[in-house]
Amino acid sequence: MQTALFRLPFQLGSGARVLVVGAGGGSDVVCALPVALALRSLGCEVWLASMASVIPLEHVEGAEQVLPQLYRVGPNCHVPAPKYCPESFLAEWWLRNLGESRGAG
């Protein structure tokens, strides 16, 4: 079922796996949160990814290096001040509001 506020130009079945990706430093994937939540409401399994450019992720405490250029950032990661990591903030929000944690930490 699709609402008037969220219509896809194609059909996704319940249980479809969807990757929502941003490449603008983290804020774009944060802004895609309504899309991710709408997809979840349609029964999709939603994963979020971002091409981080704001902070080198090797400086984020608790970020798990999965591959040479791929890190998993979770809700318990620590970002040293004065840096910020939108991906970490989003992971915290996801855990706090949805009770799920798929990231590190």
Image (cartoon, grey):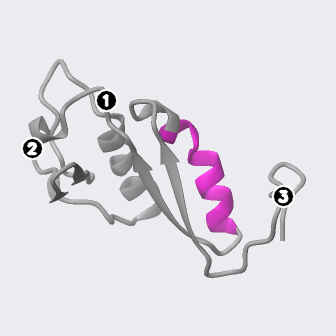
Q: Which percent across, then down, holds residue 97?
A: 46, 55
Instruction: Give the mark, 2 or 3, whose residue is nearer the N terminus.
Output: 3
Task: State the residue lying farthest toward the right.
Answer: 4
Q: Dot 1: few (<14), some (14–19), or many (≥20) neighbours within 10 Å?
A: few
Quadrant housing residue 24? top left
Q: Residue at the location (15% across, 53% down)?
A: 68
Q: CA distance from mark 1 to mark 2?
A: 16 Å
Residue located beneath label 1 in the image? 53
Q: Which percent across, then down, holds residue 78?
A: 15, 40
Residue located beneath label 2 in the image? 61
Residues shaded magenta? 29-41
Q: Secondary structure at mark 3?
A: loop
Q: Residue at the location (40% across, 35% down)?
A: 26
Task: State the residue lying farthest toward the front.
Answer: 68
Whether 37 is among the magenta residues is yes
Please state which of residues 96 and 67 is positioned toward the viewer in this rendering.
67
- Secondary structure predominantly adopted by residues drawn in magenta: helix
Q: Secondary structure at mark 1?
A: loop
Please state which of residues 23 and 103 is positioned toward the viewer in this rendering.
23
Callout 2–callout 3 Cβ contact below 8 Å: no
Which numbered mark, 2 or 3, is in the foreground of this view? 3
Residue located beneath label 3 in the image? 9
- Number of numbered discs visible in the structure rendering: 3
Quadrant housing residue 89? top left
